[in-house]
Image (cartoon, helix red, strand yellow):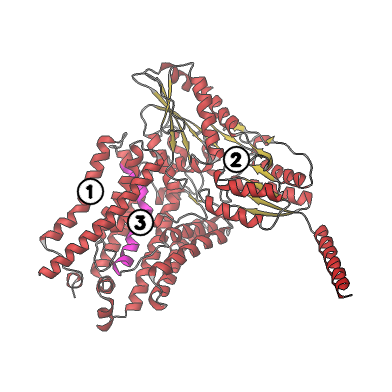
C-alpha cells in the first residue's frame, strides 16, 4: 500500500513538473563576443527583438573585452549547465570551446553560430550560422580601394627599387572574423594587384608570401594586443612605413587605434601629415563615421549587425523546435561620404 | 629631518653610478631604435612617444608615492579607466556640460584612492590584496555605471573639439605634454619639499620608527593612496584625450606599465627610496621601448615578450641596487 502511494506521489510530481516546464517559455542562451562596441549593441538589439517576436526567454552574455577568451568559455559552461533549448555562440577562439561543443552534441543542445560563428566545430554541433562572410566583406574593401585611380596609378608606377606599400591593420590573428577579413583582403588584393607588378606579402607569418624583387608590398600588421594603446602603437608603426599608399583596417577596435594615431583621422585630410594615403575601414561607430563623412577615410565596410543578432535568435528558436535550418550570409556594404546618409546605408551604420 | 637621513645611504660614489644606469638605458634604447627602427628617428615618432606617455606618466607619478611608502596600488589602471568612463557617462548619458564632466574625472580617481588608503592604512589589509580587490571593483564599477557602453569623447572636426586642443594637441603642438610636465613638477615638489613627502620616505624606510616618533602614519599613508588615485584620475582625462574612447572592462594591465616605469626609474619596491626624476626617465624608457619594438617590425607576440623581459630586468636591477645599498650601509 505504502509503495503504491509512493508511486502515485512520484507520478503526480513528475506530471506536475512536466506541466510546469511545458508552460514555461523556451530558454535560449546567446554568448556573444562583447558589449562595448556599438556593433555589439546593434547585435544585442536584434537578438532582443527576435526574442520578443518569438516569445522566448533569452539570456545574453558578452565578455568585458574581446581578449577575454577564458571568461567567455566560463560563461558558456555556466549557460550549458542551465540546459538551454538552443544556444547561439560567437566564439572568440574556436579551439577554446571544442570540449563544450562536443558536450552540446552529447546533451542534444543545438548550437547556432553568429557573427564570426564557430568554424571547424565538431561535426554536428553547429546547426547553422548567421554571419557576414568576412572574407567576401573584406574582399569588397580591396575591390573598392583598387577602384581608386590614384592608387592604381601608384601601383602601376611601382618598381622593385621603390616598392609601394599597402598595409592591413588587424587587432588579432586568433578570432575567426578578424583573421577571415585579413585573409579576404590579402587574397583579393594579391589577385588584383598582380596585374600591376610582383606582390609580396609580409609582416606576419600566417599570411607571408615571399616574392623576388617585389614592386608592391602588402604588409600585415597585428597589434600586440587588441587594447587601444597597443593598436595605436601598431598604427603608428604602419603609418611610418615608407611609400605607404593605402591602408585597410579590419575592425572597429583597430580603427580606434588608427584614429588615435592620426588626430581622429584628420591627418589623412587636406594638409595632414598622412594626406594621400587611401584608407578603408571596417564596421561603423560615431568616430569612424566622422572620419568617413569628412572624407578622411575613402570608405568603410559595414556588416548588418542587427540582422546578425535577429537571425541568430530566429535560427536558434527554429533549431530548438526541430525545424531544419541552414547558414545565412547577412551581407556587407561599402559606405563612403557620398552614400552614408542614404536610408538603406544609414540603417546599417550604427553609432 | 632631511630625506637622506631616512632613506638608505645615498650619495656614495657606487650608488651614483647606479643612478646613472636608467638615463643611460634610455639614451641607449633610443639610439638603438634610431639606428635599427623604421623611420624611428623623427620628430613625429618623438611626438608619438610623448603622447603615449601622457596617461602612463600620470599613473606613474602617483604610484611613486605609494611605492616609496612600501606599498603598491594595482588598481590604478582600472581606476584611471573607470574615471574616464564615468566622465564620459556624465557627459553623454547624464547630459552634463563637458567641463563639469571633466571635473568629475579626477574626483572619481581620488575617491577610489581614498578607499584604497582606508583599506590599507586603517583596515590594515596588505596593499597587494586591497588594491587587487579594488582593481576588480573599479573595473566592474565602470561597467555598471556605463551599462557596458563604450564612452566616446568629442573628436577633432566635431563640436567641442576644444577638448582635444586643450588636452591633446593643437595643430602639431602636443598640449598634453604640458600637463605631463606640470604633473611632474608638482609631484616632485610634493615629494621633496613638503612634510607629507618626507613622511612618505620615512614610512617606507621604517614604519614603526616613524610611528614611534609621533607621526600619524595612518593619515599620511591614506594620503599617499589618495594622491595616487588623484593622479590616476587626471590620467583618465589625458587618456580620453589621447584615445577618445574609454571601453568598459578594460584598464587592467595598464598598471604594469606604470609600475614598471617606477621601478626602472630606481624606486625600490621595498620602499623608502626613489625619486620623481627617476620615474620620469622610467616612463620614457617604457614609451620608447613600446614604440621602438613596433618600429622594428617585430610581430606582436615578440613585442609583448620583450616588454616582459625588460620588466623582469628592471626588478632584477632593483634587487642589485638594494643589495648594493645594504653593503654600503654595512661598510659605512
Q: Would you place residue A263 above or below residue B15 in this image? A: above
Q: Is mark 1 on a helix, strand or loop?
A: helix
In front of the other: label 2 or label 1?
Answer: 2
Instruction: In the rendered view, tell whether residue A115 sits above or below residue A295.
Output: below
Q: How far apart are marks 1 and 3 (CA)?
A: 17 Å
Residue B210 locus on image (x, y percent): 26, 79
Q: Is residue B36 magenta?
A: no
Of helix, strand and loop, which mostly describes the magenta segment?
helix
Residue A351, x across and y down, in percent: 59, 45
**Magenta segment:** B46-69
Label of residue B258 in the image: 3
Residue B115 in picture, x, y percent from top left? 44, 71
Pointer 3 with pointer 2, Cβ within 8 A? no
Seen from the viewer's position, the closer of residues A332 and A136 is A136
Query: x and y percent of residue A299 in the render?
Result: 54, 32
Task: Tell which circle, 1 or 3, labels the residue nearer the N-terminal end.
Answer: 1
Q: Who's the residue at 50% across and 51% down the image?
A: B153
Give SS at disc 2: loop
Of all chains, the one bearing label 2 is A
The residue under label 1 is B25
Give the Cα separation between the discs numbered 3 and 2: 35 Å
Q: Do labels 1 and 3 share a chain?
A: yes
Q: Horizontally, is B302 left or right of B332 in the view? A: right
**Between residues B194 and B203, which one lies in front from this camera angle?**
B203
Q: Distance between the residues labelled 2 and 1?
A: 44 Å
Amino acid at each position: 500500500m505504502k509503495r503504491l502511494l509512493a508511486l502515485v506521489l512520484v507520478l503526480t510530481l513528475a506530471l506536475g513538473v512536466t506541466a510546469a516546464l511545458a508552460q514555461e517559455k523556451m530558454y535560449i542562451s546567446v554568448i556573444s563576443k562583447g558589449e562595448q562596441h556599438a556593433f555589439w549593441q546593434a547585435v544585442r538589439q536584434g537578438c532582443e527583438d527576435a526574442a520578443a517576436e518569438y516569445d522566448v526567454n533569452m539570456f545574453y552574455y558578452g565578455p568585458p573585452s574581446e581578449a577575454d577568451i577564458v571568461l567567455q568559455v566560463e560563461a558558456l559552461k555556466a549557460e550549458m549547465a542551465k540546459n538551454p533549448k538552443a544556444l547561439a555562440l560567437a566564439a572568440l577562439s574556436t579551439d577554446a570551446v571544442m570540449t563544450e561543443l562536443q558536450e552540446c552534441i552529447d546533451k542534444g543542445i543545438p548550437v547556432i553560430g553568429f557573427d564570426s560563428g564557430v568554424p571547424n566545430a565538431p561535426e554536428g554541433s553547429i546547426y547553422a550560422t548567421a554571419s557576414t562572410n568576412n572574407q567576401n566583406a573584406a574582399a569588397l574593401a580591396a575591390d573598392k580601394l583598387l577602384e581608386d585611380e590614384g592608387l592604381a596609378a601608384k601601383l602601376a608606377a611601382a618598381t622593385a627599387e621603390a616598392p609601394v606599400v599597402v598595409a592591413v591593420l588587424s587587432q588579432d590573428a586568433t578570432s575567426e572574423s578578424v583573421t577571415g577579413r585579413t585573409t579576404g583582403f590579402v587574397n583579393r588584393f594579391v589577385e588584383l594587384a598582380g596585374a600591376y607588378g610582383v606582390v609580396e606579402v609580409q609582416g606576419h607569418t600566417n599570411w607571408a608570401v615571399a616574392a623576388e624583387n617585389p614592386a608592391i608590398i602588402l604588409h600585415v600588421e597585428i597589434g600586440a594586443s587588441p587594447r587601444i594603446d597597443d593598436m595605436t602603437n601598431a598604427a603608428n608603426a604602419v603609418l611610418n612605413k615608407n611609400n605607404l599608399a593605402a591602408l585597410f583596417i579590419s575592425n572597429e577596435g583597430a580603427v580606434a587605434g588608427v584614429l588615435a594615431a592620426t588626430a581622429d583621422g584628420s591627418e589623412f585630410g587636406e594638409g595632414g601629415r598622412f594626406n594621400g594615403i587611401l584608407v578603408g575601414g571596417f564596421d561603423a561607430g560615431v568616430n569612424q563615421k566622422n572620419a568617413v563623412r569628412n572624407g578622411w577615410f575613402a570608405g568603410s565596410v559595414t556588416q548588418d549587425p542587427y540582422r546578425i543578432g535577429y537571425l541568430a535568435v530566429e535560427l536558434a528558436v527554429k533549431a530548438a523546435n526541430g525545424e531544419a535550418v541552414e547558414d545565412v550570409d547577412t551581407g556587407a556594404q561599402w559606405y563612403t561620404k557620398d552614400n552614408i546618409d542614404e536610408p538603406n546605408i544609414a540603417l546599417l551604420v550604427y553609432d | 629631518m632631511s630625506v637622506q637621513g631616512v632613506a638608505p645611504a645615498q650619495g656614495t660614489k657606487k650608488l651614483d653610478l647606479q643612478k646613472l644606469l636608467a638615463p643611460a638605458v634610455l639614451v641607449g634604447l633610443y639610439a638603438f631604435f634610431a639606428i635599427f627602427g623604421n623611420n624611428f628617428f623623427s620628430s613625429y615618432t618623438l611626438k608619438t612617444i610623448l603622447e603615449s606617455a601622457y596617461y602612463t606618466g600620470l599613473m606613474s607619478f602617483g604610484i611613486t608615492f605609494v611605492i616609496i611608502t612600501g606599498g603598491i596600488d594595482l588598481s590604478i589602471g582600472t581606476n584611471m579607466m573607470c574615471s574616464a568612463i564615468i566622465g564620459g557617462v556624465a557627459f553623454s548619458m547624464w547630459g552634463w556640460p563637458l567641463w563639469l564632466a571633466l571635473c568629475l574625472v579626477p574626483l572619481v580617481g581620488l575617491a577610489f584612492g581614498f578607499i584604497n588608503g582606508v583599506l590599507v592604512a586603517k583596515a590594515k589589509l596588505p596593499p597587494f590584496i586591497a588594491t587587487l580587490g579594488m582593481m576588480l571593483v573599479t573595473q566592474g564599477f565602470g561597467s555598471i555605471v556605463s551599462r557596458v557602453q563604450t564612452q566616446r569623447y568629442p573628436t577633432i572636426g566635431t563640436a567641442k573639439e576644444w577638448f582635444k586642443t586643450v588636452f591633446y594637441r593643437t595643430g602639431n603642438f602636443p598640449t598634453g605634454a604640458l600637463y605631463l610636465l606640470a604633473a611632474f613638477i608638482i609631484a616632485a615638489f610634493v615629494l621633496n619639499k613638503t612634510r607629507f613627502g618626507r613622511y612618505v620616505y620615512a614610512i617606507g624606510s621604517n614604519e614603526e620608527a616613524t610611528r614611534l616618533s609621533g607621526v600619524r602614519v595612518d593619515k599620511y599613508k591614506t594620503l599617499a593612496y589618495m594622491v595616487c588615485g588623484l593622479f590616476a584620475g587626471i590620467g583618465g582625462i589625458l587618456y580620453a584625450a589621447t584615445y577618445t574612447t574609454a571601453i568598459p572592462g578594460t584598464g587592467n594591465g595598464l598598471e604594469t606599465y606604470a609600475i614598471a616605469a617606477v621601478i626602472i626609474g630606481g624606486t625600490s619596491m621595498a620602499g623608502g627610496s626613489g625619486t620623481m626624476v627617476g620615474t620620469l626617465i622610467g616612463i620614457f624608457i617604457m614609451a620608447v621601448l613600446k614604440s621602438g619594438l613596433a618600429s622594428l617590425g617585430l610581430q606582436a607576440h615578440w613585442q609583448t615578450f620583450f616588454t616582459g623581459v625588460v620588466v623582469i630586468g628592471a626588478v632584477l636591477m632593483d634587487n642589485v641596487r638594494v643589495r648594493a645599498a645594504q653593503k654600503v650601509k654595512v661598510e659605512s
